[in-house]
Amino acid sequence: MRANATPRRGRGQAYLSDAERRSAIERHAVAVAIAHYRSLGATEITELGKPYDLRLTLNGQERHVEVKGSTVPSIETIELTQGEVVHARGWAATDLVVVDGIECGPGSDGPLTTSGGRLRIFNDWSPAEQALQPTQRLPGVGGLSERRRRV
């Protein structure tokens, strides 16, 4: 089965309709981020998923990390949920980790394999309002809606 990847605009994070492929790319990006922070001496690394991907201690300070992965080389825009934006703005020590250019394809024994990618770290990241652009509205519970944003 071939995954459907459709870049939204320009050099942004590609939207993937294949959940298995999307999950493999995200897991790979998180593994790259964990290896990076371990190499810096981070301890107590915990994978959370929401509202951010990793919690860790680095140089005695708790840091929260949002990780984004993509097969697109040199992405310039990413998609964020409203929860990710709110959390990053409310927690001073938040890093954004982007791993782009990840290779993903079937392995020799069938399951998807991932490799490579370019690691970029944005330390003490807080998304600025002028950098955010709503891309879609998603139906929510009880008439509420979650807005996805691209930065």
Image (tube, rainbow, N blue to C red):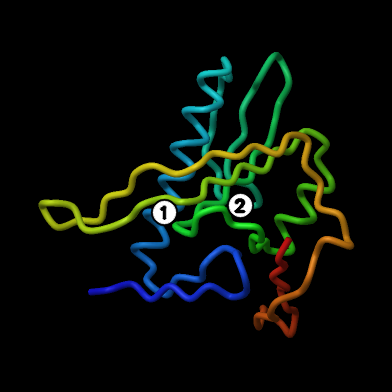
- Circle 2 sits on which residue? 50
Identify the residue at image location x=71%, y=82%.
142
Q: Are marks 1 and 2 in contact (CB under 8 Å)?
A: no
- Circle 1 sits on which residue? 25
Where does residue 124 sit, x and y in percent of width and height?
A: 78, 35
Q: Amino acid at mark 1?
A: Ile
Where does residue 105 sit, x and y in percent of width and height?
A: 27, 58
Residue 25 in the image: above or below residue 138: above
Q: Amino acid at mark 2?
A: Lys
Side of 69 relative to 52 (left or right): left
Quadrant for residue 77, please give it. Answer: bottom right
Label 2 sits on a secondary structure element that is loop
Where does residue 86 sit, x and y in percent of width and height?
A: 80, 55
Residue 82: mark: none
Residue 114 in the image: above or below residue 151: above
> Foreground: 87 or 114?
114
Task: Work out how far the residue at label 1 is from the one at label 2, CA to CA, in angstroms.
Answer: 17 Å
> Foreground: 140 or 148?
148
